Image: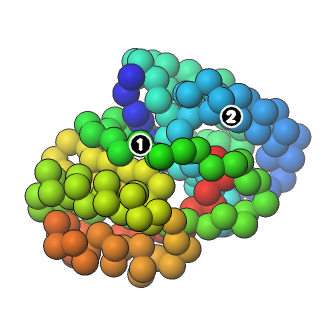
Amino acid sequence: MLVYHAAITAAEDYLERRAPHRQAHFERIVGLRAQGFVIGGGPAPDGRTADIFYRVAQPPDVVRLIEYDPYYLGKVWTAYTVRTFSQFIEPWELPPVVTDGSRRATLVEGVALEPDMATFALIELRGAGRLAFGGFFEGGATLALLNTADSAEASGRLADTGFWRNETLTARALLYAL
């Protein structure tokens, strides 16, 4: 099974559009999570984007999971891009689903100088409870979900290891729903 990151863009009128589709979206995505197809994710605090991590066998499967979602069908989600992880650090366990925006986390992206050593750093961060999950794309590009709402702290956790190009590290907030 492959792990994919879907970066989703929402409609300008996201809040109005989502209301009639919200319950069906949550039921479906929580069901996909229970079946092992969704690892985690959630929206940005402003609702303009979402990041969802899927586990499926083939690229067309992830397209179907996105495009059959009630949010996509209802035009709440308007666009998406998908990237395939070449290496993925799985979560120790899946946290409970939180839909009230109270579990804030940070997505950090950057380029690893030494991907092998950076892998060990992510595993250590996960073991310390600081990383939910994350991994690497081709070329050493990294995407990791860190268990802090403080973006400077989150990117600092990677920078402090010395295994990433610090000038490439960027951080953005995520309401870690799944």
Quadrant housing residue 76: top right
Residue 28 percent coordinates (x, y) = 73, 30
Residue 39 percent coordinates (x, y) = 53, 39
Is residue 23 visible to us here? yes
Residue located farthest toward the left when viewing the structure as drawn = 114
Disc 1 is placed on an element classified as: loop
Which residue corresponds to mark 2? 29
Q: Amino acid at mark 1?
A: Glu
Residue 115 shown left or right of residue 40 in the figure: left
Residue in the picture at 54% in, 45% down: 93
Number of numbered callouts drawn: 2
Disc 2 is placed on an element classified as: helix
Of mark 1 and mark 2, the one earlier in the sequence is: 2
- How has the structure been colored for display? rainbow
Which residue corresponds to mark 1? 90
Residue in the picture at 25% in, 61% down: 121
Residue situated in front as seen by the camera: 38 or 131: 131
Residue 173 shown left or right of residue 58 in the figure: right
CA–CA distance between discs 1 and 2? 18 Å
